[in-house]
Amino acid sequence: MNPELSIKMRGLDVKVFYDSNQALHGITLSILENNVTALIGPSGCGKSTFLRCLNRMNDTIEGARVTGHVFLDEEDIYDSSLDVVELRSRVGMVFQKPNPFPKSIYENVAYGPRIHGLARSRLELDEIVEKSLLKAGLFNEIKDRLHDAGTGLSGGQQQRLCIARAIAVSPEVILMDEPCSALDPIATARIEELIDDLRKNYTIVIVTHSMQQAARVSQFTAMFHLGTLIEFGATETIFTSPKEQRTQDYITGRFG
Amino acid sequence: MSAQHIVRSFDKELDYLAKKIAEMGKHARHMVERSISAIVQDDSFLADRVIAEDIVLDEAERDIDEKAILIIALRQPMAVDLREIVGTIRMSADLERIGDMGKNIAKRVAAMTEIRQSASFYKNLEAFASLALRQLDEVLDAYAKQSLERIDAVREHDDEIDAMYTSLFRELLSYMVEYPSNITVCTHLLFCAKNIERIGDHATNIAETVHYILTGYYPLSERPKDDQTYEVGLDKKRIFQKNV
Ligand SMILES: Nc1ncnc2c1ncn2[C@@H]1O[C@H](COP(=O)(O)OP(=O)(O)O)[C@@H](O)[C@H]1O
Ligand SMILES: [Mg+2]
């Protein structure tokens, strides 16, 4: 492995309650910079909940309560002085179902930079839009119809549009919650290829139900079960010789 | 192995591979055993049967390969399952080679008929073959029982095989020096001994594969040295000295 791994984000004893139901039981987990970390585990084990802790998306959920700490670089993102809007531009999110705004392709990507004041002129904004679409591997396919509706694209293109939208505000970390589960194998392969490309510039955390996808795209894997972290390690190790029986049982399809 | 798979037919497929390996092991062992008998008893009928039966192992190896590849394609196995499947492919190749060794030995029977020696002449070769086959038995038993301790125990016997091979090599060399009329038969026997030594190597390979299947890594300790006979020269004094 890369000898100069540095920690980009770090959860420290993170607990999440939905009203009286505890979904996470004290997760401590580091996310390494310019790497893809996959979160795996059976449905309901808390992967999405943990992912949402990384950009405080749980704040928006009624009855959700988070304790513990999450650090972005050195900063505790649960510190009351932190600007949540700025946090979400530094830690972007891509969801399971592609959810472009009912606007043009251009406007979908331009929206973020505009509200964050990242462009001083129309020209600069154009540039950001083009670059983001390029990085998301979408530009060449849609360059002649930038002003068509984003919702008119295919599922895979919509998902790449959402990635372009996330990239447009120059995030440091991109969170993806099952980004391919609504896509066909070709569109999935494109997104996986893109993820591998993106990690040069961004740190990525991905939740996936596909063991093969986790094995293909990530460098590190965290295995969750019933709201606890069972095992964390190099993806290579997790998928060839995991140390924990529960990891082994889950990835080999022996979970009852 | 731990609990059953959610998809039961996956367990059946894995069981099939394991059963097939056990069968190949039995068959390979039987071939080698009878090839030695054929040499000792100068039984060319038996030798021909051994030679003809080699195809069973070739077919079994191909069958295992095909099934293993199909499982990989259909089930995308992970962790211990993946190691088990890849391990079976490797083990079947080693077992097929062991069968080849038996066939090679059997092929010499025809050429040795003219120069047949008394049964006692082959005693050490027979003992050497038993040692190598015992190694194979132990390794297959360890695989069937998924026992890491047994695997480690097997690996400790590797040195015995090497030592016995070197001593047999010296013995045959000294016969040739002593009675040049024995050169032909001894040369054939040297090749037989070499084949048996290779069987020991394949058994060691299998032991390492089983270790990998069980643990996810290859045994750490240095692999026992193999063929040391390159050190044995035609220096008469040395041959005799070591042999007395
Ligand atoms: N918005 C929510 N309100 C109440 N409970 C929730 C909510 N989201 C998740 N949970 C509960 O938290 C646990 C973890 O869920 P989640 O993080 O979605 O798991 P995963 O993503 O691994 O499938 C589950 O028991 C789930 O029912
Ligand atoms: Mg989820």
Image: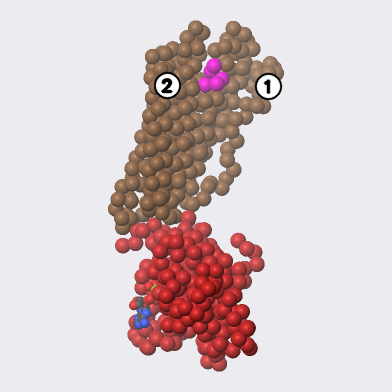
Chain colours: A red, B brown
Q: Quadrant of ligand 1?
A: bottom left
Determine the residue positioned at 47% across, 9% down: B113
Tell me if residue B41 comes above or below residue A249 in the rendering: above
Q: Chain of mark 2?
A: B
Inspect the image, locate mark 1, and give the three-letter code of the amino acid beneath it: Gly
Quarter of the C terminus of chain B within the rendering: top right
Q: Residue furthest bottom?
A: A81
* Residue A141 point in image, percent of width and height: 51, 69
SS at mark 2 in the image: helix
Residue A13 in magenta stretch: no
Q: Which stretch appears magenta?
A: B188-192
The foreground one among A53 and A162 is: A162
> Mark 1 — residue?
B233
Q: Residue at x 38, y 19 (%)?
A: B49
Circle 1 chain: B
Q: Which numbered tag is attached to residue B80?
A: none
| B14 is higher (above) or lower (below) than B126 | below
Q: Main secondary structure of the magenta part?
A: helix
Q: Mark 2 or mark 1, which has the lower sequence index?
A: 2
Mark 2 or mark 1, whichever is nearer to me: 2
Instruction: Residue under label 2, please give it.
Output: B51
| Disc 2/disc 1 C-alpha distance (Å) | 34 Å
- Mark 2 is on which residue type? Ile
